[in-house]
Amino acid sequence: MTALHENPTAYQDTLRILSEASVERHFDAFTDIPWDDPEYAVVPNDPRWILPAADPLGATDWYRSLSTERQIEVGMYRQANIMKVGLQFEQILIAGLMNYAFRLPNGQAEFRYSTHEATEECHHTQMFQELVNRIGIEVAGGPRWFRALAPIMPLAAGPLSFGFFVGVLAGEEPIDHVQKAILRSGENRHPLITRIMQIHVAEEARHIGFAHQYLRHKAPRLRTYQRGLISVIMPVIMRVLCDAIIKPSRAMRRDLQIPDHVVDEVWWDGEASRKMLRDMFGDVRMLADDLQLMNPVSRRVWRALGIDGRPSRFRSEPASAAA
């Protein structure tokens, strides 16, 4: 187990590097995506909307048995809903970052980085919503409880900032894992999806990196009882937010008429889906180990929630190497 220690100089250097990277390499939702290119047009009956096998739903026998027209309809709805729930999570994150930055004293490097990240997340919400608008399907995004609590969750970023950034990772790590898997598959898909994912993955690498560094920096200040409490709550937050963001809501399942047995197999009863669920959190398990948040009690919670396993040896270790 890695001993906890605080290195303020290294932390400040990391924030400076991340902030400079945000200046040197960033994307704009409307200049870096060729929305009006005919090749990128959203038109009916475009087979590029058929879900690839890298998509958990797209790999099912149920989906593959549908007519081509129906596969396109389901694919467009699913992509629109994924973008909508991603947008909703980003809006919570932006509000939380602003709440956190509001309390920072002058001269804090965290202020500059937090506002850089909020700026980038605003561009993400713009490109997500633009795609939803162009697809033209009315989608709700996350489950009802998630949308109901959305105005409240950012408030935790002030008094409960450590827990808030645990929640940030709970949303960002699963999305990043799934998008990387789809991009690596090389399967044919609509170019708007590919471009949006490329931009999102590139900038989320900084955002996830900051959340990891923030928690490493703050963990030495936790009291013993706080560390014990967070060690148990952390896997719960991971699983709950993962399901809210990755698993289709009741509304989506109803609208697409996805059979219950298909939902159960894909999220998370099937052997392959259970492995994917565990793989999403290899980096977080590594972080929990390093922060001394793994103990006999918390390990049982990770296991009970189906997100236990070997921690990553380094950030973004491919799942195949971690198996």
Image: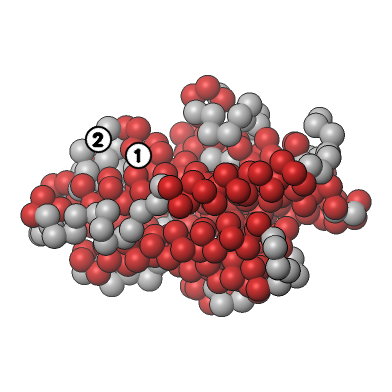
Q: Which residue is mark 1?
A: 182
Give x and y (percent) for residue 68: 13, 48
Q: Which residue is mark 2?
A: 187
The residue at the point 27 percent across, 40 percent down is: 52
The residue at the point 39 percent across, 60 percent down is: 124
User: Pointer 2: residues within 10 angstroms few (<14), some, or many (20+)?
Assistant: few
Q: Where is residue 187, by image quadrant? A: top left
Q: Are the two marked residues, 2 and 1, in contact with CB atoms closer than 8 angstroms?
A: yes
**What residue type is disc 1 on?**
Ile
| Element under disc 2 | loop
Q: Is residue 80 visible?
A: no
Camera-side residue of 188 and 249: 188
| Element under disc 1 | helix
The residue at the point 20 percent across, 48 percent down is: 190
The residue at the point 71 percent across, 41 percent down is: 10
**What residue type is disc 2 on?**
Glu
Task: Please identify the quadrant where the N terminus is shown.
Answer: top right
